[in-house]
Amino acid sequence: MPPVRSGVSDYAVELLRPMSRSVDVRILTPPNSEGPPELPSELASLLVPLETPGIPGEIFVAHFGNNPYHRWIIEQSRGRRTVAVVHDLVLQHLLVHQMLDVTKDSDAYAAAMREAHGDSGVALAQARSFGVSGRLDPFLFPALKALLGDAEALICHSEFGRRELVRLFPGRPVLRMRLPVADPGPLDRSKIREKLEISDQEILMMHLGFLTPEKGLAAILGGLAAARGSGINARLLLVGQEAEGVGVQAVAERLGIGPSVTSTGWLTWDEMVTAPVAADVGVVLRVPSAGETSAAVVRFLACGTPAAVIARRQFLEWPEKVAPRITPGPSTIAEIARLLRRIPEDDDWQDRRPAARAFYEDGHMPQQAAETMAEFLKSLS
């Protein structure tokens, strides 16, 4: 829940508003990691203390994401009738945090890895106990069975995710529901560009969300540098908080594009949901990907802005017209540069804006998602 700076936090509020109008909802108060929850009044009235026991027949809808903010949900889901909303198809980071960083129980971690991945999982746990681990280990050993094994049903946001969950949990009900984000409503694009100090002559590429190396920032900066080197008047605006040690601006300065890279830092919710309309193209490059469906992409589409995505797995489910594809690997920088060159030269580029908005309206609006989820939950009763 807000004020926790997590995409799932925003998602929860945007979905709970319409959900609370169609089904009986109680909201467990999360531990005070960043102060008391910041909720609209109609949701704040639904909060109950964390220690509140379940009601017979009540379904505990537990949101699982791959970061420490979700640790408390592991304990709360035990002994309850749980439906897991799987935001990430990799939960190894969460498992490590819970069992090794917090409880420091290496035996429990090894047992969980055996449950999830058999002998290979145990070997990984043993290697970690000797201080041997690799950056890609979590993506090769996602540990979903270790944390989701007791869930009665599962919900995800992509067809790729649905197929993976059906494979791992045969016989378990699985719902694929389009990822909802709030409707920003009618927007004055010129006014927002002016507020962000973007001129009409500039091609604006925007990155939305928490800034980490895994989101392809090196390639994004390289593509911008190549585009500007070829005469394209392009800029990059980073909307979101930067992870410690990322140093985007320092890299931009070394590439000679410092003045063309700016950052807003963390924005208020109202500013964050409307900012994407200012961009000519969003950019979302997640490599490696934890199988998540990007809320950032959907926020761009809600504002009528096409968003370039990495051409892998779940990101291929979006039409190319609204989500131009960037090939992962050595060609990424060149493809970003070509995309930026294409925008002012492509007479049809502006046609992508209404197409992006139409795609958002077809299932990604919170009311639509709430109705889909409510139907699914009622089918389990």
Image: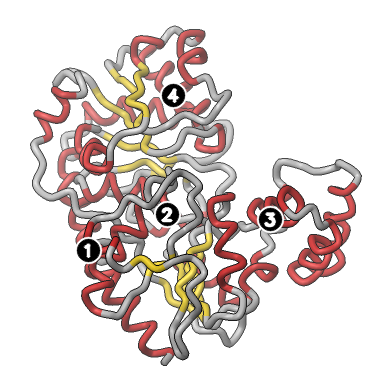
Check disc 3 and report the residue beneath it: 98
Q: Are marks 3 and 2 in contact (CB under 8 Å)?
A: no
Check disc 4 and report the residue beneath it: 223
Q: Amino acid at mark 4?
A: Gly
Mark nearer the N terminus (3 vs 1): 1
Residue 54 point in image, percent of width and height:
48, 81
Question: For the residues carrying marks 4 and 2, which lies nearer the camera in this image?
Answer: 2
Q: CA distance from mark 3 to mark 1?
A: 33 Å
Identified at 25% across, 30% down, the residue is 343
Query: Mark number for residue 8?
Result: 2
Check disc 1 and report the residue beneath it: 42
Identified at 56% across, 42% down, the residue is 287
Mark nearer the N terminus (4 vs 3): 3
Question: For the residues carrying marks 3 and 1, which lies nearer the camera in this image?
Answer: 1
Q: Are marks 2 and 1 in contact (CB under 8 Å)?
A: no
Identified at 64% across, 54% down, the residue is 94
Q: In the rendered image, which quarter is residue 70 located in?
A: bottom right
Q: Amino acid at mark 3?
A: Gln
